[in-house]
Image (tube, grey):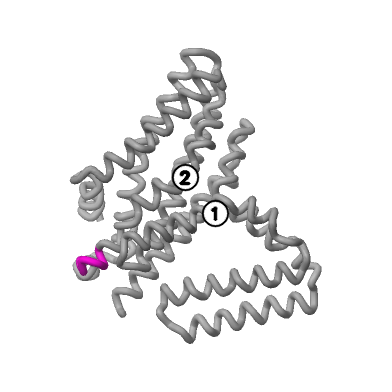
Amino acid sequence: MGAIWKRELKSYFSGMTGYLIIAFLLTAVGFLFKLYNLQYGMPQFEYTLWQISILLLLFVPLLTMRTFSEERRQKTDLLLYALPVPLYRVVLAKYFALLTVMALPTAIIGLYPLILRLFGQVSLVNAYSALLAFYLLSAACLAIGMFLSTLTDSQMIAAITAFAVLLCTYLMSLLADTVSSKPLANAVCFGVLALLICIVVYLITKNYLVSYILFAVLALGICLVYLLKSTWLEGAFAQLLNTLCLFDRLSDFMNETFDLSTVVYYLSVSGVFLFFSVQSVEKRRWS
């Protein structure tokens, strides 16, 4: 596992890719830090972190697009399957390499609250709590991006798909406001969500029968709820979107509060998509 982690980490810095991605992130953070905290005199570093979270939409796909898709394209994933270690260790090693790369700019960003404190009173507790939440948000996004990379052998498709999915999670609160609260509209939205879930299940399992059965069960459940208890569906889809929104939870740390539920949520999202990644790789191994 350690050898795979070192190999993956080295691959990011053997060329210019890792350096350019980190330099891009730090340049953007430095600009916003100068603008909001130094020029405008805003003492809340948490606000700067909230603003730069949108950069993860670009940063994460560029990092994760090659984790498994490049292995599949070059057929080197066959070597991974032959290793005398469980595949979940391979997935974890690649994920820890991504976390290590993300930890480097995060550590440098951690110096900014100390610089800001030289010019006035700054709550370091709030600043570093927000920084922890930002890192955990990054970890959740990296897990999502890595899972999507296991589904294709094209880096470009992996990057575009990861960007699209993360963009949807970023805009979830806005999408929630556009959804009608009427039961029929919510039933249709849940039906579309069920279809998307079944497509992902098919991509993981490559089993049409399982996907069809799952969609039939979900569709039947939605229809029964609509016919028997339609009031349960009023505003339910908008509530679900608000609950699942990754990026909006970071704003909780701008109110000078440490939200443990947000930490648990980010860790849970990371764990779920790591599990999906392992299942996807296992299916590839035996296909």
Give the residue at x 43% y 66%. Answer: 276
Position of residue 75 measured from the top left corner of the image (x, y, whole percent): 21, 69
**In the orientation shown, which residue stands out farthest toward the top?**
119
> Which residue type does callout 1 highlight?
Thr
- Decide which of 227, 99 is in the foreground and name it: 227
Q: Are the residues tagged 2 and 1 within 8 Å (C-beta)?
A: no
Write down the quadrant of residue 228 in the picture. bottom right
- For the point 34% across and 68% down, which residue is it? 152
Q: Residue 121: x and y, percent?
A: 55, 16
In the rendered image, which residue does mark 1 sit on? Answer: 169
Point out which mark residue 136 bears. Answer: 2
Q: Amino acid at mark 2?
A: Leu
Q: Is residue 182 magenta?
A: no
First in sequence: mark 2 vs mark 1: 2
* SS at mark 1 in the image: helix
Q: Which residues are magenta?
A: 71-76
Q: How many numbered badges does the structure rendering display?
A: 2
